[in-house]
Image: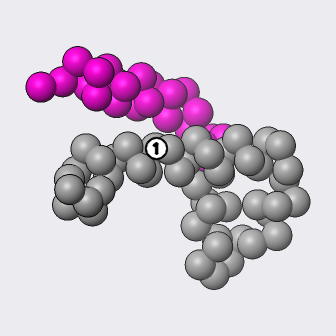
């Protein structure tokens, strides 16, 4: 099933996007920072969320991992 129609898969994709963007911005800030507007601005926004809300994102990642491993 597609991640669009499965809510848990959609949340997993969003969390992975936030974590990946924050990691890439830590490695190469100029890669993410040059596109603050437009369609590629989504990656900049995800990186900002990952940096500013990192304890909450980490908790969500742990909870998502537990539900994926031990759910159903």
Identity of the residue drawn at 76% across and 60% down: 32
Q: In x, y percent, where is residue 26?
A: 79, 42
- Image-quadrant location for residue 20: top right
Q: In x, y percent, where is residue 45?
A: 61, 60
- Label 1: how many Cα within 10 Å (few below 14, some 14–19, many 20+): some
Of 49 and 13, the residue lying toward us: 13
Identity of the residue drawn at 32% across and 52% down: 10
Q: In x, y percent, where is residue 65?
A: 37, 25
Q: In this view, does 29 lie to the left or right of 22?
A: right
Q: In this view, does 12 lie to the left or right of 27?
A: left
Q: Is mark 1 on a helix, strand or loop?
A: helix
Q: Is residue 40 left or right of residue 55?
A: right
The residue segment tinted magenta is 49-72
Q: Is the magenta stretch mostly helix, strand or loop?
A: helix
Q: In this view, does 11 lie to the left or right of 39?
A: left
Q: In x, y percent, where is residue 14?
A: 43, 51
Identity of the residue drawn at 55% across and 48% down: 18
* Quadrant occupied by the N terminus: bottom left
Identity of the residue drawn at 18% across and 24% down: 71
Picture layout, residue 62 above or below residue 8? above
Which residue is identified by label 1? Answer: 15
Of 5 and 29, the residue lying toward us: 5
Say if the magenta span includes residue 60: yes
């Amino acid at each position: 099933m597609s991640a669009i129609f499965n809510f848990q898969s959609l949340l997993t994709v969003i969390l992975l996007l936030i974590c990946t963007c924050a990691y890439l911005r830590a490695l190469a800030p100029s890669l993410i920072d040059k596109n603050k507007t437009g369609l590629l601005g989504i990656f900049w926004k995800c990186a900002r969320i990952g940096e500013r809300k990192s304890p909450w994102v980490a908790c969500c990642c742990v909870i998502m991992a537990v539900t994926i491993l031990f759910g159903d």
